[in-house]
Image (tube, rainbow, N blue to C red):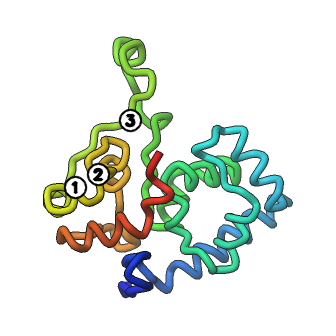
Amino acid sequence: MTLMKVSATEGWFAMAAREVDVRRWLQEVREDRSLTQTEVDRRTRQLGENYRVSQSYLSQIERGTRPFTDLGAERMDGLRRVYGISPEEWVKRTGISLMTPDDVSLTSDANESAPGYFPEYTIPSGLQSAIEKHGDRFPALRTEAVQRNLSLARYYDGNGPESADDWLSYYLSIAKWIEN
């Protein structure tokens, strides 16, 4: 995997040869299931707005003009569900493990007290350093939703950003997709 600098405002993103394989595989699965990009848009929208993958967004992913990892966990899970791909197959093909609220077994007490429950996560030390170092300039870094999304970040090799500056660059590259 190689990290490339796109521009000062876009930050760093992971480029991997596997990205091409994932894009091709997703397109093949869609076509094998006789789904159009518009139908995928409609079906992912039915799962909820956070899971929606629009036709134009999917087209960009399949053409390679937008990295597959830009989808984020919820949109990836939306595609996985619409395409009928098991979580195990998804991990095998993409190298990305998706943990969604539907994957978590909750007790009845937890269901009553936390209807929007997400699994617990740990903020990596490098991300914590980024929050402390850059949180005043980028206040969204201090929000729970952004911290959760960033904490779950992993590249194809299973690792995520390490230094505070790596985390900031990663955040800047995906901010418009993970901020509310």
Element type at mark 1? loop
Callout 2–callout 1 Cβ contact below 8 Å: yes
Q: Earlier in the sequence, mark 3 or mark 2?
A: 3
- The amino acid type, in three-letter code, at marker 2 is Pro
Label 2 sits on residue: 139
Q: Is residue 135 above or below residue 45?
A: below
As shown in the figure, which amino acid type bears the numbered disc 3? Phe
Quadrant of the image occupied by residue 23? bottom right
Give how far apart the Cα atoms at labels 3 and 2 are. 22 Å
Mark 3, secondary structure of its residue = loop
**57 or 18, nearer to the observer:** 57
At a point 37% along the width and 43% down the height, the residue shown is 145
Q: Tag 2: Cα neighbours inside 10 Å, few (<14), some, or many (≥20)?
A: few
Disc nearest the viewer among 3 and 2: 2
Question: x, y (%) of residue 158?
Answer: 33, 67
Q: Please state which amino acid type lies under the numbered disc 1.
A: Gly
**Where is mark 3, residue-wise?**
118
x%, y% of residue 18?
50, 80
Q: Nearer the viewer, mark 3 or mark 1?
A: 1
Direction front: furthest residue:
137
Task: Count neighbours of disc 1 (C-alpha within 10 A) and say few if under 14, some if 14 to 19, many if 20 or more.
Answer: some
Toward which corner of the image does residue 156 lie, by quadrant? bottom left
Disc 1 designates what residue? Answer: 135
Q: Residue 27: where, in percent of width, then height?
A: 72, 70
Quadrant in the picture for the N terminus: bottom left
